Amino acid sequence: MVFLGQAPVLLFLWKMWDYLD
């Protein structure tokens, strides 16, 4: 599943979003 491979990237983006907010 490609989604599983992208999961860590999505989490990283979420952390960045939290910092921006």
Image (cartoon, rainbow, N blue to C red):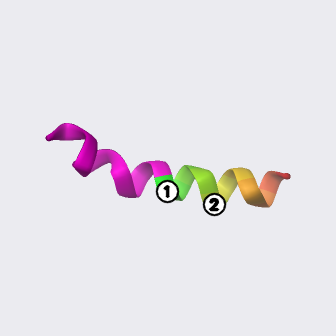
Helix, strand or loop under label 2: helix
Q: Is residue 5 left or right of residue 6?
A: left
What mark, if any, has residue 2 been given in the picture?
none
Helix, strand or loop under label 1: helix
Q: Residue at x 42, y 52 (%)?
A: 9
Q: Residue at x 36, y 51 (%)?
A: 7
Q: In this view, does 4 lie to the left or right of 11?
A: left
Is disc 1 in contact with disc 2, using a CB cutoff of under 8 Å?
yes
Q: In the orientation shown, which residue stands out farthest toward the right?
A: 21
Q: Give the range drawn in magenta.
A: 1-10
What kind of residue is marked 1?
Leu
Position above or below: 5 against 12: above
Residue 3 is covered by the magenta coloring: yes
The quadrant of the rendering that contains the N terminus is top left
Give the crowd class for mark 1: few <14, some 14-19, many >=20 residues within 10 Å. few
Q: Is residue 17 left or right of residue 1?
A: right
Q: In the orientation shown, which residue stands out farthest toward the left?
A: 1
Q: In the orientation shown, which residue stands out farthest toward the top?
A: 2
User: How far apart in space, not on screen, are marks 1 and 2 (Cα)?
Assistant: 6 Å
- Number of labels in the image equals 2
What mark, if any, has residue 15 been given in the picture?
2
For the stretch drawn in magenta, the main secondary structure is helix
Name the spot of residue 3 as percent of width and height, x first.
Answer: 27, 41
Name the spot of residue 16 as percent of width and height, x first.
Answer: 66, 56
Name the spot of residue 10 as percent of width and height, x first.
Answer: 46, 48
Give the crowd class for mark 2: few <14, some 14-19, many >=20 residues within 10 Å. few
Position above or below: 9 against 15: above
Q: Which residue is label 1 attached to?
A: 11
What kind of residue is marked 2?
Lys
Q: In this view, does 21 lie to the left or right of 9?
A: right
Q: Which residue is drawn at 32% across and 46% down?
A: 6
